[in-house]
Image (cartoon, rainbow, N blue to C red):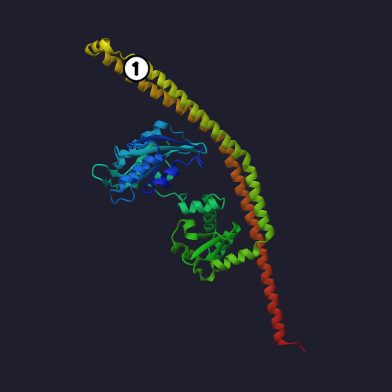
Amino acid sequence: MILKGSQRGGAINLADHLMNDRENDHVTLVEVRGFVARDLHGALAEAYAISKGTKCEQFFFSLSLNPPKEIVASEQDLIDAANQAEEKLGLHNQPRAIVFHEKEGRRHAHVVWSRIDGISMKAIPLPHFKNKLMSLARDLYLEHGWELPEGLRRDGGKSPLNFTLAEWQQAKRLKLDPREIKQSFRDAWDRSDSAKAFQHALEDKGYFLAKGDRRSFVALDIHGEVFSVPRMLGIKTKEVKHKLGDPESLASVDDTKSAIARKVTDHIHEYIEQVDAKHDQDMQPLTDQKLSMRANHRSERQHLKAKQQEREQAETRARNARMTTGLRGLWDRVSGNRAKVQKQNEQEAWLAAKRDLKQRDELVKAQMLERRKIQLELDKLRRKHIKDRQILYRDITQAMRMSDQVERMQRQDKTRDHSREYRGPSL
């Protein structure tokens, strides 16, 4: 599975993010170890309080564990992977919390450790943790027999589909998947051999090349959102300049925004709003179905949890009833019968815990398969919406080019008129 870790602070923000059930179908706090508090906010607040006795600002190590897309990893698989990461990083027995997230029919885990050693009151160093996690990720793929992704096959070569948080948020505001945006830039770049060709290729996809204040080459979409060309392509600025030349010949960002504002008519803006409204309307039934399913799944899990707790209490009472008291209990201690009964109780309790774990996993897997059916429909509809936007942007670009041609013809007509006035009437 893919492992992504980072050192960080921010107890409140981290707890809010991990327990966010608005963007996840299900959020489960699986384990809180080494803290007095039993809830995540309280546990992370404890870690923050302890860190105040040190100079460490990044007192957490946060790790996400993502199985392959087509795999439903069991609860035990994720916990085992967390334990291996703990040993690999040198965080053995440090206070930690484990949270499971489920979204779009997939399950992944988050683990947060406190880096503060409670005895020495110093932060545990984590040298080369990225290399260690990459090595462990490769081992986990091989251990489970999963197909290695390209990034691990090529000694950790970074995938072009990795995005920064800022890029993701920017794309989310525009209702576009960041992969879609980057792919548009890459397609335009690959089929262009000059600045003019790249400019036209971008315009075909609804982006307009401009001269940035600091980034040299930028592009704007029809909403005026600015994108760094090198960042979208995943290459260095000097490589962009080598192919495109001097950006000084391009219009500035402000001038480009003004040109876009002039050219995109009110009718086209209304068309954009209509398409967005239609997309929202298309999504609503599936969204309602997804929310209803999430509520049902949560209810089923809560019901199973209650039944398991009820059964656990009954079984615990039955096992406790085997432990005799009084003179009989004293004799059982002397004769060794009490030790035998205690060992039997421990064995039965362990088997019961394994049985409950298996039941939870079976329920989760069944629910995730059901959830994936909806996700297939959602993905299909999203692909259609992407195609709709591509067609829309193509139409907008054509309209803008026609407007450019009209403006050029008007300027040429004015130039000819001025020229005739200057020469005067012909004799």
Q: In which quarter of the image is the C terminus?
A: bottom right
Please say if 182 is above or below 109. below
Specify whether 11 is left or right of 334: right
Q: Where is residue 337 in the image (x, y as percent from the top left)?
A: 26, 12
Q: Which residue is drawn at 61% across and 66% down?
A: 259
Q: Nearer the viewer, residue 46 or 165?
A: 46
Q: Is residue 392 visible?
A: yes
Rendered position, 272 above or below 366 = below
Q: What is the quadrant of residue 371 in the picture?
A: top right
Provide residue 186's location: percent of width, then percent of height. Answer: 52, 55
The furthest residue to the bottom: 427
SS of the residue under disc 1: helix
* Of 393 and 261, the residue lying toward us: 261
Which residue sits at x=56%, y=50%?
A: 176
Q: Is residue 230 left or right of residue 94?
A: right
How many neighbours does mark 1 have within 10 angstroms: few (below 14), some (14-19), or many (20 or more)? Answer: few
* Labels in figure, total: 1
Q: Which residue is drawn at 51% across and 36% down?
A: 105
> What residue is disc 1 on?
320
